[in-house]
Image (cartoon, rainbow, N blue to C red):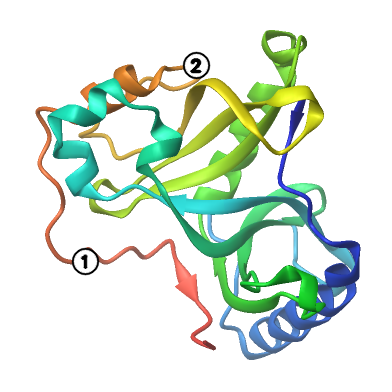
């Protein structure tokens, strides 16, 4: 079976309230609209149609790890770094239109809630939804054990992927080799296959002949709520 990292139930209400406040402000001011390609423009966004979807702990993969020849012999879980953030899918009328990011407390045991730090409307959200649905349709590949799914970002290559780790005896201890599913990648990363379960080596080799992006490219399909 597939699962994500546990999201403390006590965090749901305060985070939902924060997201509602941000969405309400952004919808009311016209800062947030439904772009073509993200949602059907004929479906107006209202607070009643919003819902919080799946969530994933986030990690990032540095270009130095990608370029290190020794990385090909290691597991992706050893190469990534946790960001301290959690990704939350946002849906409008059951369809993903954007996502929120929350800050995960360093010591969850102290009872502090997760706080909202980012909110976007972007085509990444439906791409993540497509990958979730593909995993659901192929869950038989993971039926014999429990597997944890995390979201990995590779900023220098504008790429996102699911890191899928097998858990030992239902615990949080990982075992065996991780699997990788590409969620999104630019067209020039044509060597990265979609809807294919990859090993770490197969995933990393797709970057061998590619150059990382220098600087930041504008993207009209992304809107950010700059409240950090």
Residue in the image at 50% along x and 24% along y: 178
Circle 1 Cα neighbour tier, 10 Å, few/some/many (<14 / 14–19 / ≥20):
few
Residue in the image at 69% along x and 83% along y: 22
**Which of 50/209 is in front?**
209
Q: Secondary structure at mark 2?
A: loop
Residue 188 percent location from the top left of the image:
20, 34
- In the picture, measured across the screen, residue 41 lies left or right of residue 202, that is right
Circle 2 Cα neighbour tier, 10 Å, few/some/many (<14 / 14–19 / ≥20):
some
Q: Secondary structure at mark 1?
A: loop
Q: Is residue 39 visible?
A: no
Q: Which badge, 1 or 2, is on the more N-terminal residue?
A: 2
Q: Are marks 1 and 2 in contact (CB under 8 Å)?
A: no
Q: Which residue is mark 2?
A: 197
Residue 220 percent location from the top left of the image:
37, 65
Instruction: Identify whether 130 is placed above or below 23.
Output: above
Residue in the image at 23% along x and 42% along y: 65
Question: Disc 1 and disc 2: Cα gap in Å?
Answer: 30 Å
Task: Point out the frontmost of discs 1 and 2.
Answer: 2
Q: Which residue is mark 1?
A: 216
Instruction: Identify whether 75 is placed above or below 161.
Output: above
- In the picture, measured across the screen, residue 69 lies left or right of residue 12, that is left
- In the picture, measured across the screen, residue 142 lies left or right of residue 57, that is right
């Amino acid at each position: 079976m597939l699962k994500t990292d546990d999201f403390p139930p006590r965090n749901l209400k305060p985070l939902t309230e924060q997201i509602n406040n941000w969405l309400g402000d952004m919808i009311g001011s016209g800062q947030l609209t439904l772009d073509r390609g993200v949602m059907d423009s004929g479906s107006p966004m209202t607070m009643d149609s919003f819902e919080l979807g799946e969530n994933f702990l986030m990690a990032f993969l540095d270009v130095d790890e990608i370029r290190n020849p020794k990385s090909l012999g290691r597991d992706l879980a050893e190469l990534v770094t946790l960001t301290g953030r959690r990704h939350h899918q946002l849906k409008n009328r059951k369809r993903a239109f954007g996502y929120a990011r929350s800050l995960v407390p360093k010591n969850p045991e102290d009872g502090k809630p997760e706080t909202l730090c980012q909110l976007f409307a972007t085509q990444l959200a439906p791409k993540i939804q497509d990958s979730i649905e593909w995993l659901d349709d192929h869950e038989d590949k993971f039926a014999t054990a429990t597997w944890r799914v995390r979201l990995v970002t590779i900023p220098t290559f504008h790429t996102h992927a699911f890191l899928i780790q097998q858990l030992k005896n239902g615990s949080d201890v990982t075992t065996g080799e991780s699997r990788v599913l590409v969620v999104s990648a630019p067209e020039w990363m044509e060597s990265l296959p979609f809807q294919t379960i990859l090993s770490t080596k197969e995933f990393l080799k797709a970057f061998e002949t590619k150059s990382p992006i220098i600087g930041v490219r504008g993207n009209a399909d992304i809107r950010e709520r700059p409240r950090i």
